[in-house]
Image: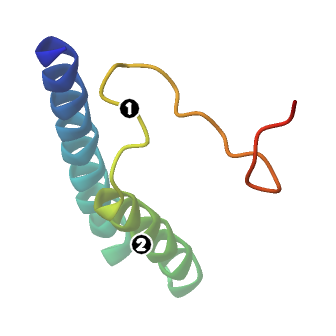
Amino acid sequence: MIASMVFVYSASMLDEEFNKQRANLVRDLASRADPFIKKRLLALVSRYETTRTKPPLVSLNGQDRPRRQKGGGESG
């Protein structure tokens, strides 16, 4: 169980680092682009930055989270 928790944490750290580096790269490209492309690149940067703030949607035991059924109850 601890190993799966460490994996989820380190995987999210890698994703966070990737998004940070990609946002910096795209921001650098935007600084050298024409106004139309710059606007689109900066919109892309905002996507990379917002994904950094969201927690991962993986449970600690490595399985997908169960989806809630409409109506809130079990069928049976």
Q: Amino acid at mark 1?
A: Ser
Picture quarter with the C terminus: top right
Q: Position of residue 65 (x, y in %)?
A: 52, 34
Q: Secondary structure at mark 1?
A: loop
Question: Given the current orientation, which residue lies at the most extreme front position?
Answer: 76
Looking at the image, is 19 positioned above or below residue 10? below
Task: Please tell me how many numbered marks the rendered image carries.
Answer: 2
Looking at the image, is 68 positioned above or below residue 48? above
Which residue is depicted at the point 48% across and 69% down?
A: 41
Looking at the image, is 17 positioned above or below residue 59? below
Circle number at residue 46: 2
Circle number at residue 1: none
Question: Given the current orientation, which residue lies at the most extreme bottom position?
Answer: 35
Q: Amino acid at mark 2?
A: Ser
Q: Secondary structure at mark 2?
A: helix
Q: Report the side of 73 relative to 31 (left or right).
A: right
* Occupied quadrant, residue 59: top left
CA neighbours of label 2 inside 10 A, class few (<14), some (14 to 19), many (20+): few
Picture quarter with the N terminus: top left
Q: Which residue is mark 1?
A: 59
Question: Marks 2 and 1: which is nearer the front?
Answer: 1
- Which of 32/16 is in front? 16
Which residue is depicted at the point 30% across and 28% down?
A: 60
Q: Position of residue 45 (x, y in %)?
A: 40, 67
Which residue is depicted at the point 82% across and 53% down?
A: 70
Dots 2 and 1: beta carbons under 8 Å?
no
Q: Position of residue 19 (x, y in %)?
A: 30, 50
Question: Given the current orientation, which residue lies at the most extreme right position?
Answer: 76
Q: Report the side of 43 relative to 6 (left or right).
A: right
CA neighbours of label 1 inside 10 A, class few (<14), some (14 to 19), many (20+): few
- Which of 39/18 is in front? 18
